[in-house]
């Protein structure tokens, strides 16, 4: 709910005051595009089935796609190694290849 002590739960609901003319302030639910004239109406909207379905739809759309290929790590590792380390390893590989050619 909006009045929860848990900050994480409170952050889920983005409240906007649409109009501030005297006592008539309305509240807007971004996930449902619902405008409520009072806090009571807004809190009752938050407990509806439609609101919960919209929240789940939004959360699922933020999850990564399991079929999507993960990024390749080898290039990242090479960048993190540093210039000197990379070239030392590259030189060691060249020497190993030369030795392998001589033996055959």
Image (cartoon, rainbow, N blue to C red):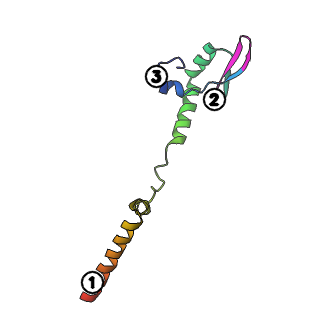
Between 38 and 45, the one lying in front of the other is 38
Between 66 and 84, the one lying in front of the other is 84
Between 66 and 97, the one lying in front of the other is 97
Disc number for residue 99: 1
Marks 2 and 3: which is nearer the front?
A: 3
Mark 3, residue position: 6
* Residue found farthest to the front: 84
| Residue density around tag 3, few if under 14, some if 14–19, many if 20 or more, within 10 Å | few
The spot of residue 18 in percent (x, y) is: 71, 23
Marks 3 and 1: which is nearer the front?
A: 1
Residue at 66% over, 14% down: 38
Upstream in sequence: badge 2 or badge 3: 3
Is residue 16 found left or right of 6 in the rendered image?
Answer: right
Element type where label 1 sits in the image: helix
Q: Main secondary structure of the magenta part?
A: strand
Q: Are marks 3 and 1 in contact (CB under 8 Å)?
A: no
| Residue density around tag 2, few if under 14, some if 14–19, many if 20 or more, within 10 Å | some
Please say if 2 is above or below 71: above
Mark 2, residue position: 32
In which quadrant of the rendered view does residue 70 lie? bottom left
- Magenta residue span: 19-30
Marks 3 and 1, how far apart in space?
Answer: 65 Å
Element type where label 2 sits in the image: loop
Q: Are marks 2 and 3 in contact (CB under 8 Å)?
A: no
Marks 2 and 1, how far apart in space?
Answer: 68 Å
Between 88 and 62, the one lying in front of the other is 88
Marks 2 and 1: which is nearer the front?
A: 1
């Amino acid at each position: 709910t909006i009045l929860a002590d848990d900050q994480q739960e409170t952050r889920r609901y983005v409240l906007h005051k649409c109009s501030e003319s005297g006592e008539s302030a309305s509240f807007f639910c971004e996930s449902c595009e619902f405008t409520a004239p009072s806090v009571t109406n807004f809190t009752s909207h938050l407990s509806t089935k439609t609101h919960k379905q919209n929240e789940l739809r939004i959360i699922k759309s933020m999850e990564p796609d399991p079929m999507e290929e993960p990024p390749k790590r080898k290039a990242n590792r090479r960048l993190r190694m540093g210039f000197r380390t990379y070239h030392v390893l590259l030189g060691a590989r060249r020497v190993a290849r030369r030795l392998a050619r001589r033996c055959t």
